[in-house]
């Protein structure tokens, strides 16, 4: 584990976002870093596609919403 230096403004956005997402500030930062890394490595995928792929690889069963 290491220390990552970030600016005060970004830290404040992490703090606010982490409370909305029910994550610690560190967990929120780790989430953003992971998603950013995946987005850079897979530029043709949308955020939604990246999340669906991650959930599937973790064997998370996501309910499907039926539309009329």
Image: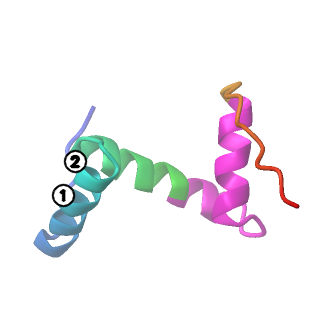
Q: Are marks 2 and 1 in contact (CB under 8 Å)?
A: yes
Secondary structure state at the residue bearing disc 2:
helix
Residue 47 position (above or below residue 65): below
Q: CA distance from mark 2 to mark 1?
A: 6 Å
- What residue occupies the far bottom of the structure in this picture? 9
Q: Which residue is mark 2?
A: 25
Q: Which residue is mark 1?
A: 15
Query: Is tag 2's residue or tag 1's residue first in the polypeptide sequence?
Result: 1
- Figure label count: 2
Which span of residues is magenta-colored? 36-57
Asked whether, in this view, residue 29 is left or right of residue 10, the answer is right
Residue 6 visible here: no
- For the residue pair 32 and 49, the one nearer the viewer reads as 49
As for residue 32 lying within the magenta part, the answer is no
- Residue 60 drawn at (x, y percent): 67, 28
- Residue 40 drawn at (x, y percent): 62, 64
Residue at 33%, 49% in the rendered image: 28
Asked whether, in this view, residue 30 is left or right of residue 20, the answer is right
């Amino acid at each position: 584990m290491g220390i990552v230096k970030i600016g005060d403004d970004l830290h404040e956005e992490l703090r606010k976002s982490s409370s909305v997402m029910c994550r610690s500030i560190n967990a929120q930062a780790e989430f953003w870093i992971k998603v950013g890394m995946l987005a850079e490595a897979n530029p043709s995928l949308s955020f939604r596609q990246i999340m669906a792929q991650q959930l599937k690889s973790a064997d998370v069963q996501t309910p499907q919403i039926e539309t009329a």
